[in-house]
């Protein structure tokens, strides 16, 4: 059994990944093989190869530029959630370490989200969310699109926009402040799932900002919703925020 076949088999089984990482760091042929295996039909092979490549890329930054197009191609064809998540994390790493390479990709990713089939939309949403977490400044080019999505008639668009905005909030309140009026207006949406999701988003953002926390606690305490689902989410959110508030004041 030759070494190349052994590497693929190990990747397929998730075995000896540390050994493969060390080998690929010092042997260009092994690294080249890993890059080729990104196109393997078995998703575990591609996922584990990508995870190793992204570790190596931190010290071999020349890998980043050719990886961008490859990641986009992998994202569009991925059929396995774990592989899609690994690709999304790679986009996040690039957004943080090489934002200039990702900036021009944001409109392309978003266009594929808007016009793609269901699988493409789901896959792209994973990537955009990771980019939003890693470097929310990059999302400024499509911020207006998020506002439009929050006002969409489609439930799915509202929920995805809320997810993106929550991710952006991980890096600072200033990134989400412009969206708050629209999110608050969703508390009165006719769709109970949208209302519940808006509550969850506001609760999450309120955990990250003391001033907003007080506002959201008051808003949730005043809500009088007829939906069991929404009331359940309100109750859970209030408990979480009041607990944080008590800790911060003690």
Image (cartoon, grey):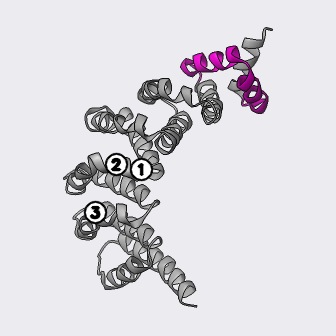
Figure check: 10 above or below 96: above
* Image position, residue 147 (x, y; %): 23, 56
Q: Position of residue 213 (x, y in %)?
A: 41, 78
Most extreme residue toward the top is 2
Q: Are marks 2 and 3 in contact (CB under 8 Å)?
A: no
Q: Position of residue 25 (x, y in %)?
A: 71, 26
- Please say whether residue 65 is one of the residues in the magenta stretch: no
Residue at 29% x, 81% y is 224
Along the horizontal axis of the image, is 93 left or right of 151? right
Can residue 15 be seen?
Answer: no
Asked if the residue at tag 2 contacts the one at tag 1, i.e. Cβ–Cβ closer than 8 Å, the answer is yes
The N terminus lies in quadrant: top right
Assign a secondary structure to mark 1: helix
Residue in the foreground of this view, choosing between 114 and 29:
29
Mark 2 burial class by Cα count in 10 Å: few <14, some 14-19, many 20+:
many
Give the structural element (helix, strand or loop) at label 2.
helix
Vertical arrangement, residue 175 with respect to residue 13, above or below:
below
Residue 83 in percent (x, y) is at 55, 33
Dot 3 lies on which element? helix
Height in image: 97 above or below 242? above
Which residue corresponds to mark 3? 179
In this rendered view, identify the residue nearer to me: 81 or 180: 180
Q: Tag 2 or tag 1, which sits nearer the N-term?
A: 1
Residue drawn where x is 53% and y is 41% of the image: 93
- For label 1, the residue is 132
Label for residue 152?
none
* Residue 35 visible to the viewer: yes
* Rendered residue at 57%/85% (across/down): 247
Residue stretch in magenta: 14-42
Which of the two discs, 1 and 3, labels the residue nearer the N terminus?
A: 1
C-alpha separation, residue under disc 1 versus residue under disc 2: 6 Å
Give the CA separation, mark 1 to mark 3: 14 Å
């Amino acid at each position: 059994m030759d070494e190349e076949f052994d590497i693929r088999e190990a990747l397929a089984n998730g075995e000896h990944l540390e050994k493969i990482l060390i080998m690929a760091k010092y042997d260009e042929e092994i690294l080249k093989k890993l890059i080729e295996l990104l196109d393997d039909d078995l998703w575990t092979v591609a996922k584990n190869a990508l995870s190793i490549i992204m570790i190596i890329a931190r010290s071999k930054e020349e890998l980043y530029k050719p990886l961008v197009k490859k990641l986009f191609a992998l994202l569009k064809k991925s059929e396995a959630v774990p592989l899609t998540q690994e690709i999304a994390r790679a986009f996040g790493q690039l957004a943080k370490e090489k934002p200039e390479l990702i900036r021009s990709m944001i409109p392309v990713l978003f266009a594929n989200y808007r016009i793609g089939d269901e699988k493409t939309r789901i896959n792209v949403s994973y990537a955009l969310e990771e980019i939003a977490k890693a470097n929310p400044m990059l999302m400024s080019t499509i911020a207006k699109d998020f506002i439009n999505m929050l006002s969409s008639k489609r439930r799915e668009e509202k929920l995805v926009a809320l997810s993106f905005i929550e991710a952006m909030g991980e890096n600072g309140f200033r990134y989400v402040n412009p969206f708050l009026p629209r999110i608050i207006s969703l508390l009165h949406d006719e769709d109970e799932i949208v209302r519940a999701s808006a509550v969850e988003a506001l609760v999450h953002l309120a955990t990250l900002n003391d001033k907003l926390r007080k506002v959201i606690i008051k808003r949730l305490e005043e809500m009088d919703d007829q939906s069991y689902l929404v009331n359940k989410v309100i109750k859970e959110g209030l408990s979480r925020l009041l607990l944080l508030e008590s800790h911060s004041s003690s």
